[in-house]
Image: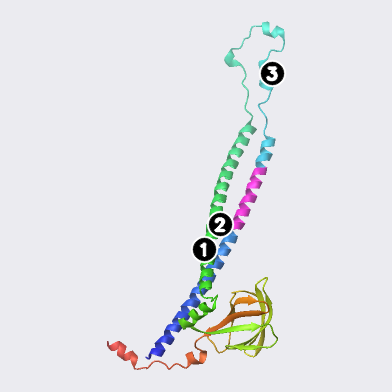
Amino acid sequence: MSRQHVLLGLLFCATLVSFVYATRERLEASAAAYSRDQLAANLSDARAKIQSLSSRLDSLAAATPSGPAPAPVVQSRPASAAADRRPSALGPSARPKAKEDPRWKRVESQLAEHRSQLAAQRDRIAQTQEDVRRTGDQLDGKINSTRDELNQSIARTHEDVLLLQKRGERKIYEFDLAKSKQFQHVGPISVSLRKADTKHRNYDLSLVVDDRPVEKQHVNLLEPVWINLSDLPQPIQLVVNQIDKNRVRGYISEPRYKNADLGGAPPPVPTQAPVLKSR
């Protein structure tokens, strides 16, 4: 197998690994966002339950009797002065005792149960808040990591463009476009600058891709624009790294090999398999 075939194989493997990694990152970010939404919904339900329990506690407190019935107090007091002068036939132990209202016991039991439910609900809310915070931190970390990786692959200056060219992974075409309705051929596509907003740092472009017109509006500075071409295995990347009045500067990068180049590689020699088996 020639050196060119080995390089092509390594390039294809690197491209496949990058695509799988980017897909996995997007899936993990989506899963984290969905988990955070679920935790927020659980937190809202928990708060609603706490409010309901608090309302029930207020209703029970309003219905609770303020004290024991006054009947035993009336019985313990003498009815008249003559009754005080009569000897009592009953001893101190024979006096009637005040009966405790059974409703009070029932209210106390319900209050204890509600206090237990409130404590458990507070614990669940605290755990939910901690899960939401942890998930948010993880999501922020993944977003920052993805942003750093994207920033490393974007050339901000002409020197950065030269570094990308030295890597040899993609072909680089720099452009300097003035506002015009005329199209300028840049690499595999034709480009026309229609608007350059220096205040908001964005621009509008008209493109001709595979003989089809394409409009890109309100594109921000350093924001990569990905364009698929029929004869390339990967999309090309358009980046504007400088916006002036009625003028933009940037570059277009495309894969070094086309579909015809990759598909035209000769298959491996069939006699290699027996050789490998005999070793």
Residue found farthest to the left: 279
Q: Give the residue at mark 2.
A: 132
- In this rendering, is residue 186 above or below 93? below
- In this rendering, is residue 60 above or below 178? above
- Residue 57 % position (x, y): 65, 40
> How far apart in space, not on screen, are marks 2 and 3 (Cα)?
61 Å
- Residue 141 % position (x, y): 52, 63
> How far apart in space, not on screen, are marks 2 and 1 (Cα)?
14 Å
Q: Nearer the viewer, mark 2 or mark 1?
A: 1
Question: Nearer the N terminus, badge 2 or badge 3?
Answer: 3
SS majority, magenta = helix
Amino acid type at image mark 2: Val
Q: Is residue 3 magenta?
A: no
In the rendering, which numbered label is found on residue 74?
3
In the rendering, which numbered label is found on residue 141?
1
Which image quadrant is residue 278 in?
Answer: bottom left
Question: Nearer the N terminus, badge 1 or badge 3?
Answer: 3
Quarter in which the C terminus is drawn: bottom left
- In this rendering, is residue 26 above or below 43? below
**5 or 52: nearer the viewer:** 5
- Per the rendered image, the range of residues in magenta is 39-55
Which image quadrant is residue 190 in?
Answer: bottom right
In the rendering, which numbered label is found on residue 19?
none
